[in-house]
Image (cartoon, rainbow, N blue to C red):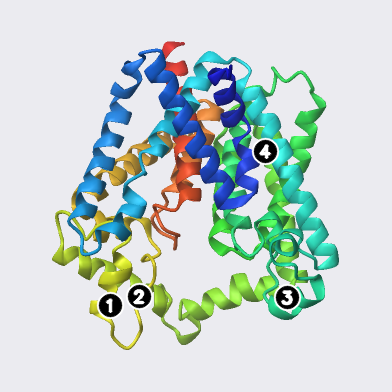
Amino acid sequence: MINLNKVIFFITSSFPIALVFGRFATDLFVSISAIFIFIIFIKNKNYKNFFDLFIIIFFILCAYMVIRSLFSIDPLLSLETSLFYFRFGLFFLAILYSLKFYKKWMEMFFYSFLIAYSIIIIFCFIELITGFNITIFIFTGRNYEIQNLIYTNPRITGTFGEDVMLGSFISRTFPIFIASFIMTFKKNKYQKLNYIALFYIPILFYLNLLSFERSAIIYFLLFIFLFSIFNQKFKKISIYMLSILFIIFISSLYFIKSFFYRFITTTLIQSNYLDNTIFSIPKEYKSYFETALNIFYENFLFGVGTKIYRLECKNYITSIDPCNTHPHNYYLQLLSELGIFGFLIIAILFLFILYNIIKHIFLIILRRTYFLTDNVYCLYISSIICLFPLLPTGSFFNNYTSAILYLTLALLVHSLKNNYKN
């Protein structure tokens, strides 16, 4: 007979490995976790877990999304996103359940991260040295000569193959990895793994640069800077690491011409800085943003329904086509698709997280008092990265980014509860 508790423990603690293999593996792990934790709660009649304030708010949001989808112009399309979105709430509960009942969960989670990063490093260096992407070859049968003819973009993608998301994976998971490193630093039976973890940091940063994903690079640098300056127990080593990463970054700008062009020249061109117009945004993104706002103005309270931006945008076509699957900004997407009610729930969450980070920083500067422990501080920054409003983003309802967001929030809630008890 299957031991459901052990299944949940294994799936949730090995989740970083699923993230390495892309959207399908990630969503599979989330869905299986949701199914098994629901069975466990029903079997044990443990219904109180569904009445946590965060979970109640989340399921109200899910119900609202489904109802809005039913009244959208294309209910079936809209329901593709909203109908089963509740699985992320159950995944959130599965993480909390595992953390509560298995003392070694965080240690196994840390080991899983080391395995996941080892896999991504091996795949990326094979691609970097030979130009051969193993994942693309497995799924398409193309050899590296043909790949080089088809994929002229210098980006590397590692295990993600044709999905350009290596940088997003590294930048979004790295703060969680550091949090797990801090929480297992002294408890780890194999202390040599701590040094391996530190050794991986510059390698991951270098791979992040080679992904050529500008938002991901900014997120990584933002985390490293905020953590290095305002952590409590790892200040010396984090300052050394910040210096090393800064040298890697400057060296890459100098020696890798394609990286300089992508990160500096292309950014200046797209921002119209070279035309003496500062603080502008690319025309395509501007068109998406304006269209999302126009949709919101006409559907102020309830939006048009999840996934419906791609249909409604056809009513706003001007000289630049504003149509895409989403408007490339979480908050504008929420405003246009879920209206002010859906937007406020996520906006309040973001402001709460931002408030605590600012409070932590100001207390250090003014009173030399540490409001947050180092691992909680990492998870707060990770949450900010997941919900950051000022850079172009993917879809808020993307399975992959949603999984990382709810993983982060689960770890954060668990850490806050433990700190409160202590």
* Name of the residue lying farthest toward the front: 1
Residue 118 in picture, x, y percent from top left:
76, 43
Q: Earlier in the sequence, mark 4 or mark 1?
A: 4
Whether the residues at callouts 2 and 1 have beta carbons within 8 Å, the answer is yes
Q: Which mark is residue 257?
A: 3
What residue is pinned by disc 4?
238
Q: Secondary structure at mark 3?
A: helix
How far apart are the two marked residues, 2 and 4, measured between alpha carbons? 43 Å
Contact, mark 2 vs mark 3 (Cβ under 8 Å) = no
**Which label belongs to residue 314?**
1
Identified at 32% across, 16% down, the residue is 48
Q: Nearer the viewer, mark 4 or mark 1?
A: 1
User: SS class of the residue under badge 2?
Assistant: loop
Residue 160 in picture, x, y percent from top left: 65, 57
Q: Type of residue at label 2?
A: Cys
Q: What crowding class fits label 1: few (fewer than 14 Cα within 10 Å), some (14-19), or many (20 or more)?
A: some
Spot the residue most to the right: 130
Task: Give the distance between the C-alpha atoms of the residues marked 4 and 1, in whole angstroms.
Answer: 49 Å
Mark in the foreground, 3 or 1: 1
Instruction: Name the residue: 35% across, 54% down.
Output: 80
Q: In this view of the protein, which residue sits in the foreground, 242 or 312?
A: 312
With respect to residue 226, does 163 lie above or below? below
Query: Disc 3 marks which amino acid?
Result: Lys
Where is mark 2, residue-wise?
A: 323
* Viewer can see residue 137: yes
Q: Callout 4: 10 Å neighbours few (<14), some, many (20+)?
A: some
Rendering coords of residue 270 (x, y %): 49, 78
Q: CA distance from mark 3 to mark 1?
A: 39 Å
Using the image as rendered, state which of residue 250 and residue 166 is in the foreground: 166
Mark 4 to mark 3: distance in Å? 29 Å
Q: Secondary structure at mark 1?
A: helix
